[in-house]
Amino acid sequence: MLSKKTLNIVMFVILIAVIITGAFLFFNKASAPTVTNNEIIFYYGQECPHCVKVEEFIKNNNVDAKIKITKKEVWHNQTNATEMIGIANKCGIPTNSVGVPLLWDGAKCYTGDTDIINWLAGKL
């Protein structure tokens, strides 16, 4: 029969293993959405002023007529936020540095209004 102390240690190790496994599954469950040529995903926050600048550029330059843009709000949609974190990790962006606006072209991430607008302008 195991002592109470040994039993507590075993239970603690099992608990830590479950937590680590759960975290791994949570952060890796979002597979990268498939995008094709002339298609991008734009992750934004509804109240984000930098995101508004990008959206105004898209609207004022009729960008969405030339490039298929899928917009995903992340501040109020946990599924989209989890997906964005997965995409950012694929791009080498540390989880604690992920923010909006973030654009993904299927291969590379672009962050911040200036970088995104410059990338979009180069595609026009």
Image: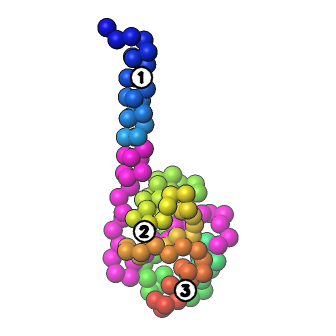
* Residue in view at x 57 percent, y 70 percent: 101
Q: Is any atom of residue 59 visible in this view?
A: no
* Mark linked to residue 118: 3
Please, what secondary structure does the residue beneath circle 1 have? Answer: helix
What stretch of residues is rendered in magenta? Answer: 22-50
Residue 53 appears at what percent x and percent y? Answer: 64, 77
**Residue 5, image x and y in percent?**
44, 15
The residue that disc 2 covers is: 91
Question: Is tag 3's residue or tag 1's residue first in the polypeptide sequence?
Answer: 1
Q: Quadrant of residue 21?
A: top left
Disc 3 marks a residue whose amino acid type is Asn
The secondary element bearing badge 3 is classed as helix
Q: Amino acid at mark 2?
A: Cys
Residues 79 and 28: in front is 28
Which disc number belongs to residue 9?
1
Cα gap from disc 3 to disc 1, whole angstroms:
55 Å
Classify mark 2: helix, strand or loop: loop
| Labelled pair 1, 2 in contact (Cβ < 8 Å) | no
Q: Contact (CB < 8 A) between labels 3 and 1?
A: no
Residue placed most toward the observer, 60 or 39: 39
Residue 1 shows in the view: yes
CA–CA distance in space, label 3 to label 2:
19 Å
Residue 28 locus on image (x, y percent): 37, 52
Q: Kindly identify which numbered label has been placed on residue 88.
A: none
Query: Image check: 80 left or right of 59?
Result: left
- Magenta stretch: residue 64 in it? no
User: Which numbered disc flags the more N-terminal residue, 3 or 2?
Assistant: 2
